[in-house]
Image: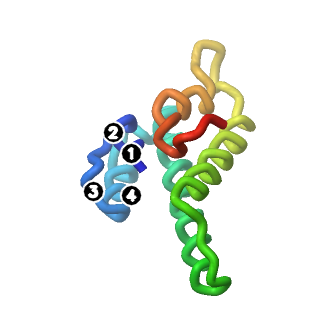
Amino acid sequence: LTLTAGLGLSSSLDIRSLCSSITSDRSLDRSPKGVVTKLFFQVIIYHLWKERNRRIFNSTSSSVSAVGSEVDRVMRDRLLSYPPTSAGCPSLLEVYFRFCTGALSSSPP
C-alpha cells in the first residue's frame, strides 16, 4: 500500500516502525488526520490477521486488490458514521479521501 506518503510517513518503514511513528507523533493525537491514520492502520492490521488466518485454517487466499478493497470499504463505512467535529472542519471521510483514495484499490468504488 502506498498511502504512507499522503500521510507524511516514510514508505520504507516496516509495519512496526510505522506503528511506532504514528503513536509517537503528537501532531496526530487529536487531529482528523491522526484519527484517520490510526483507524487505517488498525483496519489494515486486522485484515492482514484475518487473511493470514484464512490462509492457514481454510487454505484459501484473497488477492491484494481484494484485501485492499475490503479495507477501503470498512474505512468508508466506519468514517461515514462520524460527524464533523465543527461546522468548519471536514468530515473524517473527507480527510480519508484526501489522503487515501487510490492507494487501496485500483478500481473505483
Tell me the crowding category of disc 2: few under 14, some 14 to 19, or many 20 or more residues within 10 angstroms, Cα based.
few
**CB within 8 Å, label 3 to label 1:** no
Residue at the (50%, 49%) spot, across then down: 38
Task: State how far apart marks 3 and 2 are (Cα).
Answer: 11 Å
Q: Earlier in the sequence, mark 3 or mark 1?
A: 1
| Circle number at residue 19 | 4
Disc 3: which residue: 13
Reading the chain from its start, which is encountered first: label 3 or label 2?
Answer: 2
* Element at label 1: loop
Residues at circles 4 and 3 in contact by the CB criterion of under 8 Å: no
Q: Nearer the viewer, mark 4 or mark 2?
A: 2
The front one of 18 and 76 is 76
Residue at the disc numbered 1: 2
In the rendered structure, which disc, 1 or 4, sits on the residue that comes first in sequence?
Answer: 1
- How far across and down, in percent of the image, does residue 80 sit? 71, 35
Secondary-structure class at tag 3: loop
Total count of labels: 4
Q: Position of residue 5 (x, y in %)?
A: 33, 39
Amino acid at dot 2:
Ala
Residues marked 1 and 2 touching at CB (< 8 Å): yes
Task: Name the quadrant containing residue 13.
Answer: bottom left
Q: CA distance from mark 4 to mark 2?
A: 15 Å
Marks 1/4: CA–CA distance: 15 Å
Q: Earlier in the sequence, mark 4 or mark 3?
A: 3
Side of 96 where 28 appears, left or right: left
What kind of residue is marked 1? Thr
Whole-number angstrom distance, CA of label 1 to CA of label 2: 7 Å
**The C terminus, quarter of image:** top right
Local packing at callout 3 (Cα closer than 10 Å; few below 14, some 14-19, many 20+) is few
Residue located beneath label 2 in the image: 5
